[in-house]
């Protein structure tokens, strides 16, 4: 396995700082976040004002800069963290082309958020699924033309929160050009299935693994019916409800030897300490062999 970091989780660093710091720490690769994201006051955060993010607007003109930044650090691309909805064909086309030009091989395209789309359009899950399948078929064709792969992420609140749902969506498409990102932390929130069973179910569509951790905490509040209210929060890799060790063991048992990308949104440790500690932890679980 090779280890990389998704820059959604490195909000305090510029792209050049992220690349040089991760390379110095010994990471194998980087997964760049590409989305329009600026704050008026210049503040930075994971999902607002993230300084490690390449802005989507004008991204086609910055391919050379991205390549130089990555190559100067000696890092590989584990993929591209795109945010373009699969229904946005122009946006998906742009991201597929950028991925191809970079030689980054694979890029995430985002799935519809079930509840918000249902409230906005009135569409049922089945209608959203059928519409998304048609969009994904189009994306698969363009990915094939460009020699890259479009990735569907297992993500809570979308129409693909589980391996079962994702397999149903991608089934029958060319796994050379459509794949699935299995995400350990997201599954703590929604979509959890036995990991090995999920990997076997996805089969050739298992293209990438994202690792973070999460936990459910009691808010101390109760609903009108007297039941407790719980909320989810991100946690350090060792401290969430999922076992990273058991997850990596299941990946190995399945024969997966691809990228494992960390996106740790916890803040218990400062950023540089957090990324260094995460790599040391991963290496302890998957020792480097000669």
Image: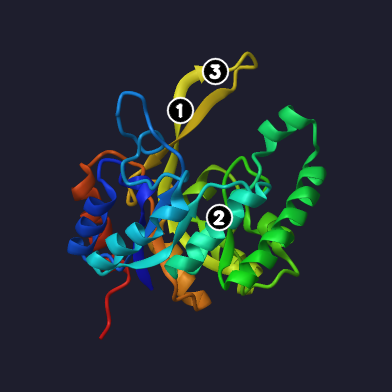
The residue shown at (22%, 51%) is 17
Which comes sooner in the sequence, label 1 or label 2? 2
What residue do we see at 50% from left, 78% from top? 255
- For the residue carrying disc 3, how many other residues have a C-alpha within 10 Å: few (<14), some (14-19), or many (20+)? few
Question: Residue 218: x percent and y percent?
Answer: 45, 28
Distance from Cα at disc 2 to Cα at disc 3: 47 Å
- Residue at the limit of the structure toward the top, as seen here: 224
Q: Earlier in the sequence, mark 2 or mark 3?
A: 2
Please, which residue is most extreme toward the bottom here? 290
- Compare residues 272 and 254 and report the one nearer the observer: 272
Quarter of the view holding residue 36: top left
Q: Position of residue 124 (x, y in %)?
A: 80, 38
Q: Nearer the viewer, residue 98 or 76?
A: 98
Q: Is residue 27 above or below residue 271?
A: below
Residue designated by label 3: 222
Q: Residue at x 45, y 23 (%)?
A: 219
Quarter of the picture containing the N terminus is bottom left
Image side of residue 37 versus residue 224, left or right? left
Disc 2 versus disc 3: nearer the observer = 2
User: In which quadrant of the rendered view does residue 128 lie?
Assistant: top right
Which label sits on residue 94? 2
Residue bearing mark 1 = 218
Whether residue 153 is visible, yes or no, is no
């Amino acid at each position: 396995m090779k280890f990389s970091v998704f820059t959604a989780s490195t909000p305090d660093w510029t792209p050049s700082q992220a690349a040089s710091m991760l390379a110095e720490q010994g990471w194998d690769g980087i997964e760049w976040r590409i989305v329009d994201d600026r704050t008026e006051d210049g503040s930075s955060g994971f999902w607002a004002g993230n300084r490690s993010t390449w802005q989507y607007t004008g991204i086609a003109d910055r391919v050379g800069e991205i390549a130089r930044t990555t190559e100067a650090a000696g890092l590989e691309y584990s993929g591209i963290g795109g945010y373009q909805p699969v229904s946005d064909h122009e946006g998906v086309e742009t991201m597929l082309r950028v991925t191809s030009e970079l030689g980054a091989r694979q890029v995430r395209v985002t799935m519809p958020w079930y509840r918000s789309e249902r409230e906005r359009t009135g569409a049922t899950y089945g209608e959203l699924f059928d519409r998304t399948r048609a969009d994904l078929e189009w994306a698969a064709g363009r990915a094939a033309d460009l020699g890259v792969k479009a990735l569907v992420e297992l993500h809570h609140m979308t129409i693909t929160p589980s391996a079962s749902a994702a397999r149903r969506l991608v089934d029958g498409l060319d796994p050379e050009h459509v794949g699935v990102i299995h995400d350990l932390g997201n599954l703590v929130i929604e979509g959890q299935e036995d990991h090995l069973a999920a990997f076997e179910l996805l089969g050739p569509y298992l293209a990438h693994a994202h690792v973070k951790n999460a936990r459910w905490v009691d808010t101390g509040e109760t609903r009108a019916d007297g039941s407790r209210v719980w909320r989810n929060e991100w946690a350090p890799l060792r401290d969430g409800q999922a076992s990273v060790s058991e997850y990596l063991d299941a990946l190995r048992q399945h024969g997966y030897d691809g990228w494992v990308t960390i996106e740790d949104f916890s803040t218990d440790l400062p950023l540089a300490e957090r990324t260094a500690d995460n790599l040391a932890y991963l290496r302890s679980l998957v020792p480097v062999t000669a």
